[in-house]
Image (cartoon, rainbow, N blue to C red):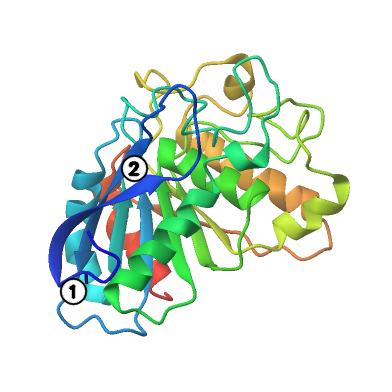
């Protein structure tokens, strides 16, 4: 796509090039962006970035969001971080913040800033005038989203939703990243700022299978609860407890009858990001 090409209404696909150098990929890495734009979507209407889960099926995420996007007049951007180019949990879920050995990487190597860069790329090519976007991630994408909110917040995010994440970075300085804050740059003074950010923890009420094949089972993850529904509640409760009498702008919401399903969560998430 040329710099002057436009993004038309309906479903489409464009490619964003990851600007970060990585010796594993000397030719660079492409990130396909799966898009949906309602016909009536105008330059001042909302844009949402939708982060896929472990299956890396961004096209299916885009398709699941098409109907609620029409209902709420949202433009959907679903980046695809393929297994070929981003093979490790550390590359995607954990934001490429640390090595598997726990060594903190330079911020220039983190994945998190790509989300805002992708938003800006799409905004400029769609004729949008929006300065902010909504952010949603489900499962592994929910892991990425709440860690981005924690460590790489940008005021361009209007509201973020972490949905059905398998594990969380708890507001706990005694537990090492990715399950806590130990070993990161995060300081005590950063905690009230994190808790004041507009984050929604969105949970499927039936996402309570302790034997789910993709459920993280590290000891630190198991300490957060037996299943995703419990872990999301524990994360929100930990944030509320850490806030004390201070500002706390997180929310928690649930979707009845839904287990570990992005299509089941999309309608509620879209309504939230539309301002509901």
Residue position marked by numbered label 2 in the rendering: 52
Query: Where, quadrant-wise, is the C terminus in this rendering?
Result: bottom left
* 57 sits left or right of 165 in the view: left
- Quarter of the view holding residue 259: top left
- Say which of 221 and 18 sits in front: 18
The relative height of residue 165 versus residue 145 in the rendered view (above or below) is above
- Quarter of the view holding residue 47: bottom left
Residue name at image x 58 percent, y 36 percent:
168
* Relative image position of residue 246 (x, y in whole percent): 82, 63
* Relative image position of residue 183 (x, y in whole percent): 77, 28
Task: Name which of mark 2 and mark 1 comes first in the sequence.
Answer: 1
- Say which of 5 and 82 sits in front: 5
* 190 sits left or right of 227 in the view: right
Residue name at image x 78 percent, y 30 percent:
182
* 52 sits left or right of 164 in the view: left
Q: Residues within 10 Å of mark 2 (few under 14, many from 20)?
A: many
* Relative image position of residue 115 (x, y in whole percent): 46, 53
Residue position marked by numbered label 1 in the rendering: 38
Q: Does residue 181 appear in this view?
A: yes
Q: Residues within 10 Å of mark 1 (few under 14, many from 20)?
A: many
């Amino acid at each position: 796509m040329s710099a002057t090409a436009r993004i038309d209404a309906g479903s489409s696909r464009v490619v964003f090039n990851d600007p970060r150098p990585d010796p594993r990929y000397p030719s660079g890495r492409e990130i396909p962006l799966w898009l949906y734009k309602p016909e009536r979507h105008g330059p001042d209407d909302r844009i949402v970035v939708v982060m896929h889960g472990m299956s890396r099926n961004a096209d299916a995420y885009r398709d699941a969001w098409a109907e609620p996007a029409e209902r709420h007049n949202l433009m959907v951007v679903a980046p695809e971080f393929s297994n070929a180019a981003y093979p490790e949990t550390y590359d995607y879920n954990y934001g490429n913040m640390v090595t598997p050995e726990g060594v903190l990487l330079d911020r220039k190597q983190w994945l998190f800033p790509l989300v805002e860069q992708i938003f800006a790329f799409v905004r400029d090519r769609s004729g949008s005038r929006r300065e902010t976007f909504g952010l949603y991630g489900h499962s592994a994408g929910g892991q990425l989203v709440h860690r981005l909110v924690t460590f790489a917040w940008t005021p361009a995010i209007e509201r973020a939703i972490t949905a059905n994440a398998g594990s969380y970075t708890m507001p706990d300085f005694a537990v090492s990243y990715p399950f806590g804050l130990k070993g990161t740059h995060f300081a005590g003074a950063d905690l009230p700022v994190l808790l004041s950010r507009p984050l929604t923890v969105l949970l499927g009420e039936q996402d309570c299978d302790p034997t789910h094949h993709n459920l993280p089972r590290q000891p630190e993850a198991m300490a957060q609860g037996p299943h995703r529904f419990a872990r999301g509640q524990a994360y929100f409760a930990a944030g509320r407890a850490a806030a004390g009498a201070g500002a706390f702008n997180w929310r928690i919401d649930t979707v009845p009858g839904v287990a570990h399903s992005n299509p089941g969560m999309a309608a509620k998430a879209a309504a939230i990001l539309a301002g509901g």
